[in-house]
């Protein structure tokens, strides 16, 4: 049994002598068990290569190449690409060349006002559907910031009915959905660009409803109000 202890003590001393104590610094490079994983044979960007006649490792981009991560969408309906059959938007337009539609900005980089897509009842209904899934828990059904998260301690959710947000450009609201702000994370991975515009349209509808008057109600519908 004592040989087992001797062996264990030897292994501990060997391990400490090789690895050192936690927090110790060493001027020697770390031990690489599989060096080929750290030092792979590869070309670095803009490096030289004797394999190609022009001596360059980088190769010219073939004609018609589409940048990675960009879809070549098909407009299923003029204006915003909404498919009423499936209830979803088409993939983003080819190369996303429209800054207004895909970034919410004008050519000078400032946030744009208005919508790059046609605002229809279908668009607003789609926005309500997405809003109730992703926005309602924090911002509440009325957009007043009284979502379910408030009862769990999240007290900083703003109301859409504040003058600051009411006067905010639609492009800035789109940008907030895309990139997030403060404690709000980005929803770009959950909402397509056109879905984000649909949510913005529904937010504007909530703001309009919150500040509506009897004059905003068609005469034929006023009799049903209590």
Image: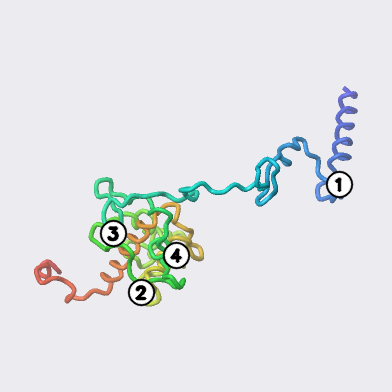
Of mark 2 and mark 1, the one earlier in the sequence is: 1
Secondary structure, mark 2, is helix
View extreme (front): residue = 53
Residue on which the image places disc 2: 166
Residue at x-position 87% and y-position 50% = 27
Residue 42 location, quadrant = top right
Secondary structure, mark 3, is loop
Residue at x-position 31% and y-position 62% = 117
* Residue 75 screen position, x and y as percent: 31, 52
Q: CA distance from mark 2 to mark 1?
A: 61 Å
Of mark 3 and mark 4, the one earlier in the sequence is: 3
Mark 1–mark 4 CB contact (< 8 Å): no
Residue on which the image places disc 4: 176
Q: Quadrant of the C terminus?
A: bottom left
23 displayed left or right of 101: right
Of mark 3 and mark 2, the one earlier in the sequence is: 3
Q: CA distance from mark 3 to mark 4?
A: 23 Å
Residue on which the image places disc 1: 28
Of mark 1 and mark 4, the one earlier in the sequence is: 1
Which of the pair 96/128 is nearer the observer?
Answer: 96
Residue on which the image places disc 3: 79
Residue at x-position 51% and y-position 46% = 62
Q: Which mark is residue 179?
A: none
Of mark 3 and mark 1, the one earlier in the sequence is: 1
């Amino acid at each position: 049994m004592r040989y087992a202890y001797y062996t264990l003590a030897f292994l501990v001393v060997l391990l400490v002598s090789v690895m050192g104590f936690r927090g110790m610094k060493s001027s020697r490079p770390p031990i690489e068990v599989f060096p080929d994983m750290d030092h792979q044979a590869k070309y670095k960007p803009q490096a030289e290569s004797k394999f190609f006649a022009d001596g360059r490792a980088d190769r010219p981009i073939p004609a018609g190449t589409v940048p990675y991560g960009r879809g070549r969408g098909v407009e299923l309906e003029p204006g915003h690409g909404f498919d009423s059959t499936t209830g979803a938007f088409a993939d983003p337009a080819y190369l996303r060349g429209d800054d207004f539609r895909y970034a919410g900005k004008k050519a000078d980089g400032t946030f744009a006002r208005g919508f790059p897509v046609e605002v229809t009842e279908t668009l607003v209904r789609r926005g309500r559907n997405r809003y109730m899934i992703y926005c309602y828990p924090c911002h509440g059904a009325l957009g007043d910031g009284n979502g379910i998260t408030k009862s769990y301690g999240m007290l900083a959710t703003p109301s859409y009915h504040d003058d600051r947000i009411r006067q905010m450009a639609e492009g800035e609201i789109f940008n907030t959905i895309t990139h997030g702000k403060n404690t709000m994370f980005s929803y770009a991975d959950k909402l397509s660009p056109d879905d984000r515009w649909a949510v913005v349209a529904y937010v504007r509808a909530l703001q309009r409803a919150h500040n509506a008057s009897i004059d905003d109600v068609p005469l034929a519908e006023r009799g049903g109000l209590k």
